[in-house]
């Protein structure tokens, strides 16, 4: 079996304000993983335009996500931070994968059905073919691991299907070009840690979302210390004190959410949080959560604001990262062209 160098790829869409759910579900993990893996972190701006985006706002949001990466602790010198549209090989490989993937596979993608809603005939072709581009994002670097949330697991499974079918369809050519029995790895998911799904501060049954009309439903990464404190104190709870056992959270979604957030921000577990705070009233627990949230998040917000005031620096980080990403992606794409049978300049 072909051997692949371990490499982590992940991306964040630049669509609207980043919030606590984005931080705990993705960016915080990115920071941790850079200590143990070679990492490529991408602002997936081509995915963003599967639905219409205001061009000026999109540019601002690309820079904001980049600022969040850096402010949270990602080192763009040791690892690669870039925006997808600067590396054209993503789109090139996506077309090859459009010809490898099957219509039936795309029809099974539940996220398209959710995003397109009832008016599917009016959805963009890009939204429908989104998983093919996602597969190209990962495999243009022949990445072995991707940190994903539960809502992205189906897309990663499709990425593995595309890689397997490409390896099978072109097995003879892959071997002839010296790549053994597989050109693309079957990328593995990385799913771990508490609070992978952060819920709304106003409704514990709904995921925290930038599209929620109430700003009090989420903590934005750009919120200052006073705003963070106010939102935590106003978070919906129930009248009962915190339980001493995790089992007691199962029918209490708002309590479960706040405990999970506390655990994720302090790198501990819900069990440990309840050992410390079980039996406490929410007024006291929220005070402790305010202290933790402000300590962890306010410095990130401050640094993001500083970086956003220096767009030239952010653009230089993206240009450098894109050049380094392109050096890898172009090698992959040249090999794909050879394997498929295209004629290219040498």
Image: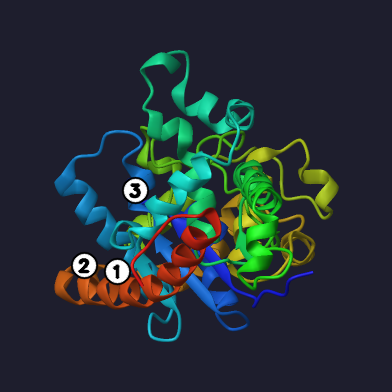
Q: Quadrant of the N terminus?
A: bottom right
**x and y percentages locating residue 186 in the rendered image:** 70, 58
**x and y percentages locating residue 268 in the rendered image:** 70, 69
How far separated are the C-alphas under marks 2 and 3? 21 Å
In front: 82, or 172?
172
Residue contact between numbered discs 2 and 1, judged by CB atoms under 8 Å: yes
The residue labelled by disc 3 is: 46
In the figure, residue 248 lies in which quadrant? Answer: top right
Q: Is residue 71 left or right of residue 171?
A: left
In front: 252, or 45?
45
- Dot 3, crowdedness within 10 Å: few (<14), some or many (≥20)? some
Picture layout, residue 11 above or below residue 153: below
Residue in view at x 61 percent, y 61 percent: 146
Residue in view at x 60 percent, y 44 percent: 155
Q: Quadrant of the C terminus?
A: bottom left
User: Label for residue 304?
Assistant: 1
Residue contact between numbered discs 3 and 1, judged by CB atoms under 8 Å: no
How far separated are the C-alphas under marks 2 and 1? 6 Å
The residue labelled by disc 2 is: 308
């Amino acid at each position: 079996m072909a051997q692949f160098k371990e490499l982590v790829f992940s991306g964040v869409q630049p669509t609207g304000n980043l919030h606590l759910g984005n931080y705990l579900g993705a960016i915080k993990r990115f920071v941790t993983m850079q200590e143990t893996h070679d990492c490529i972190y991408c602002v997936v701006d081509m995915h963003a335009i599967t639905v219409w985006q205001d061009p000026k706002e999109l540019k601002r949001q690309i820079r904001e996500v980049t600022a969040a990466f850096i402010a949270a602790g990602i080192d763009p010198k040791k690892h690669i931070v870039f925006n997808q549209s600067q590396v054209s090989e993503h789109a090139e490989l996506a077309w090859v994968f459009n010809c490898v993937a099957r219509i039936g596979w795309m029809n099974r993608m539940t996220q398209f059905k959710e995003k397109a809603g009832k008016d599917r005939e009016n959805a963009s072709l890009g939204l429908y073919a989104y998983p093919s581009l996602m597969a190209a994002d990962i495999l243009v670097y022949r990445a072995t691991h991707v940190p994903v949330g539960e809502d992205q697991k189906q897309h990663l499974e499709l990425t593995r299907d595309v890689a397997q079918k490409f390896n099978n369809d072109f097995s003879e050519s892959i071997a002839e070009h010296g790549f053994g029995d597989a050109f693309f790895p079957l990328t593995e998911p990385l799913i771990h840690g508490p609070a992978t799904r952060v819920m709304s501060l106003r409704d514990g049954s709904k995921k925290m979302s930038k599209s929620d009309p109430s700003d009090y439903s989420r903590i934005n990464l750009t919120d200052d210390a006073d705003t963070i404190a106010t939102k935590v104190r106003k978070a919906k709870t129930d009248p009962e004190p915190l339980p001493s056992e995790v089992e007691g959270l199962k029918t209490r979604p708002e309590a479960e959410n706040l405990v999970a957030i506390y655990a994720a921000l302090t790198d501990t577990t819900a069990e440990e949080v309840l050992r410390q705070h079980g039996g406490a009233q929410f007024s006291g627990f929220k005070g402790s959560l305010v202290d933790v949230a402000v300590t962890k998040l306010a410095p990130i917000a401050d640094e993001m604001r500083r970086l956003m005031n220096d767009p030239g620096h952010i653009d230089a980080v993206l240009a450098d990262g894109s050049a380094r990403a392109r050096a890898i992606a172009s090698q992959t794409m040249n090999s794909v062209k050879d394997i498929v049978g295209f004629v290219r300049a040498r």
